[in-house]
Each structure stands twice: as structure tokens, then as C-alpha cells.
Amino acid sequence: MKYIFVTGGVVSSLGKGLAAASIGTLLEHRGLSTLMQKFDPYLNVDPGTMSPYQHGEVYVLDDGAETDLDLGHYERFTSGVLSRMNNLTSGQVFDAVIKSERRGDYLGKTVQFIPHVTDEIKRRMHLVTEQNPLTDVLITEIGGTVGDMEGLLFIEALRQFALEVGKENVCFIHVTLLPYIKAAGEVKTKPTQQSVAKLRELGIQPDIIICRTEADLDEDNRRKIAMFCNVERKNVVAFRDVAHSIYECPLDLRRDKIDRLVVDKIGLGHSPPPALEDWEKFVQRVVKPKHRVSVAVAGKYIVLQDAYKSIYESLIHAGAHHDTKVHIIRIDAEAVEDHGAKAVIGDVDGILVPGGFGDRGIEGKILAAQYARENNIPFFGICLGMQIATIEYARNICGLASANSTEFDKLTMHPVICLQEEQKGIEDMGATMRLGSCESILFAGTKASDLYQNADRIHERHRHRYEFNSDYQDRLQEAGLVISCVSAEEGLVEIVELPNHPYYMACQFHPEFKSKPNKPHPLFSGFIEAVLKNSLSCENSD
């Protein structure tokens, strides 16, 4: 196996994850098999207990691992299906070391950062290598910024690992910032020089430097960076701001032939140039679509772009599939509570209610679902959004005025949503929910079955504690709510829909975690198809 390590310097949020994912895209289009992973230096075991305001959305893998949102980019940009082995945190490392010490695995030795902690990091690298013998290239992004105290052990472990597997099998890529000083009218290379100098102090000489820049990288600055950072001029690569979509990033990095630089460094130069026609066609549909629609996303963490990252990307995928630009209108659910759905949401082509936890903004989400149902606006509810749709229907159609979830009202007379039986008594928050891929049964003759092309069974990813209360199943169905999918093992409700509506679909799972650029998730694709029809019919009626 060959190894690529992506580090970052100067500031955070430079786009290391997108750079790593883009390199994975280019290598796969050269016919190489890739696998991606993320090392995060924070002490949390995983981001599952973090607020989205801290670290963006929590991305869930098939095996139930709660991971960093960059793993979402990895799965969307490449064909790999990742597991908990592909996200390592300092919390996991130290937990493993302490448990080994308690078992006596170190045979009475003094446990130290070096070698015991660095050995644990390297052990994970070797384990991933052994478990994926057919993979050509393993791409690892190191979170944080070079020079941060919390990341030093990871950098040291990679330095040691490169010596063990042979430097000819390793490519170090460093992503830095080239700031443009407007008053001086100049791009400054000094931050890049300092960042690389810090990395070299830690024993790592980068092979390729990716320069994050608003403008292009002129040859004078390219030569200066190459000279002061001890790399070849051709190995200084510009990573420019893209005009429309993150999916332009692989095409931008391809301009400086970064994939050729990488394969030459790790001895895979025999691979053919990347065949990017399908990717280019997808990007073209994103950049220059024929149609335009508006979708209101009524959520709790709406001010933060990364809180619903996978949902926004899935809307882009589905939009491109239908040659449509999806204009996302972010709606604060609390504002809907205060001012009403019509006043806040207004005239839109579709409404989506995403997942979340806690009771803030819940009544606003319920009003958004009611507004969509009563006005024949295509509606899509995800996770909590499905529970919201159920509560709204129970209140306004079944006449159960106090219907609620026990998450928000433990004493409600009509708990149409309640805590799973196996969740009762659990006190720890981390990794204790229903997590990961579960098999479900689709019922023939439903809209959901049509969207999944009449499949009998599906596998989707979950992240929740509360469920549709089966005690109310018959009453809701008699009132017209269609249950179109249940879990194969427990019979838990997975999808509800309304038959006499342009599109009213809500699912307990998270379909956004399985959508890809050229393969949009069927529920998102069906939603945007209905949204587009709604938009076109409104235009014709005008």
C-alpha cells in the first residue's frame, strides 16, 4: 500500500478535507483504489456528543461510527464505504493506551507519550493496511494546524511510520494559506514559509505544498515558495477559490496536475491520466442548470452552514440529476413559532425539516409541516422531521391535540413518539443511540417503494433515540397516514407518507449519508422532482 498524509498550516478551515477528498477523486479516476481516513487530535472519543456549533454535523457510517463531517466528503468524493477504523481521535488513542496499561500489556514499563502513544497511532495505520489488502493508496488527513500542541504526537507518529514503510511509499502534502493583503496589493508567502519550517522542525519535509489562495499563483511566488520550502517548483500547487461548488475542487487541483505529482512520488506513475468526463458533466449541471427551485430548510442549527452539510449536498446532487439549481432558504424554526409559517416561509417550492435534538424550535417545525401539508407543498422530513410530521398529523387530523414526543413532554397524554425500550435506563450519551445501517422492509404500492424502484428491502443509516409509537399506528393509518417502510428486525416505522399529496415523505433514518454526486439518494431525487413540478406548475398558472 502507498500512503498520502495531508497536513495543514497557518489557520484552520483551509479545506484540507476537500483537498484530500479531491486527490482521492483524481486517483480513483486514474483507476487506482483509494481509502480515506481522518486523524482528529481532540480528546473526545468521537464528535457524537458535540454540539453542531462546535464541529458541524456528526456524520454516521454504516457500522454506526459517529465521525467528523470530513468523512462525508470522503464518501461523496470517492467510492469507498468507510468504517470506524477510518476516524481516529486522541480520545480513542489515549483510551486504548490506558486500557492496555490497566491490563498489564506493557509488562511493568513506564507508559510514555513516545513510544506508547505514537505506537498506538501507528498500530491503527498498520491495522487499516492489513484489513484493506486490495487498496492501492491510503489517504490520511491530520486535523488541526501544524504547531498545535494537541497534534504533535500524530505528526511524530507519521514521521516514524514513513521510515518504517519506506519514504518511497509515502507522500506528505501540506496545505497552507497564501493571504492577499489588499492594502499592499500583494500575495504574501511568508505564512507558508513559516508553516513549512515548523513542519520541518518536527521532522517532516513536505513533498507537495498546496497553497490555498483567492487569486492564482504566479510564477514568482511559486519559485519563492519552492526555494524557501525546499520543494520542486512544480510541486507547489494552487488551490483556488472555486466559483460555484466544492465539486469543482478536483478539477481545479487537476490544473496543476497534482495527481501526476502524487503518483510519481509514490511509484504509481504507470496509471493512466484521470478520466473525468462524468465528473465534469455533473459539475456542468451544477454550474449551469436549466431550472431553478427554492427549498426552505426549517431547522434548529440553521445559522451554521456545516450543521446540515450532508443535507445541503444531497439537495445539490438531486438538483443536478434533474438539471436544477436548488436555492436553499434557511429558516429558523423559532422564527416560525413566533411569526407563523406563512409569514416566515412564504412562497417556496418545497419544505424540508431535518433532524436534531432538544425542544427548541419544535413547535415551529410542526407549523412548517402543517403548512406544507395544507398547501400541497412538497415536504420531506428526516429523522426528527419524520417525528414532527407524525405529531402534526396526530394533532390536526386525528384530533389528538396534546400529541407529542416524550422527548419534549414526558407527561403528554398522547405520546405518538416515545423512547425506544432499549434506550430506557441509559445514562451515557456517547454512542448509545440507534446508530448505523439497518435493514428495512418496503411495502409495495407505496410512493417509497416506487422511489426505490420496487426494492423489497433497503439499508439506511440511523442516529436517534426516539421512535414512532406503535400503539398509535392503527389510529394514524385509519386517518390516512401511510406507513410505507418498517425495520426488518423490530418492525419499527421507518417511512411515513401521504398518498394524495404532491410529495409528503418522512423517514426516520438519514438518507443524506448515502447520497453521491452522480448517484443521488432516491428520496432526495423524488423530492426535487416533485419540487420542480410544483415550481413549473406555479409558473404556468401565473
Image: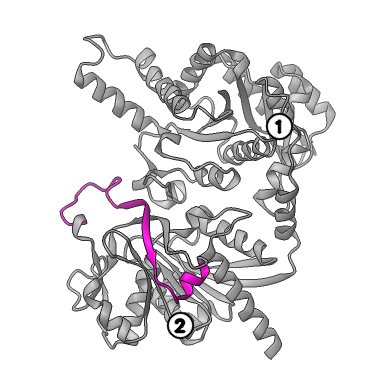
Report the front residue among 296 and 374. 374
| Amino acid at circle 1 | Asp
Q: Locate residue 297, reporting x and y percent.
A: 51, 68
Q: Locate residue 141, reporting x and y percent.
A: 54, 32
Tag 1 near tag 2, CB within 8 Å? no
Q: Is residue 164 above or below residue 296?
A: above
Q: How many numbered marks does the figure carry? A: 2
> Residue 304: in sight, yes or no?
no
| Amino acid at circle 2 | Pro
Report the front residue among 89 and 393. 393
User: Which residue is label 2 attached to?
Assistant: 499
Q: Give the label, 1 or 2, closer to the camera.
A: 2
Which quadrant does the C terminus fall into?
bottom right
Q: Is residue 531 above or below residue 114?
A: below
Q: Which mark is residue 117?
A: none
Tell me where the magenta segment starts and ends, as one range.
Answer: 423-451
Q: Earlier in the sequence, mark 1 or mark 2?
A: 1
Residue 174, by quadrant, is top right
Q: Is residue 360 above or below residue 27?
A: below
Q: Locate residue 455, reporting x and y percent.
A: 47, 64
User: Which residue is label 1 attached to?
Assistant: 259
* Mark 1 and mark 2: Cα distance apart in space: 49 Å
Name the residue: 46% across, 19% down: 157
Classify mark 2: residues with Cα within 10 Å, few (<14), some (14-19) or many (20+): some
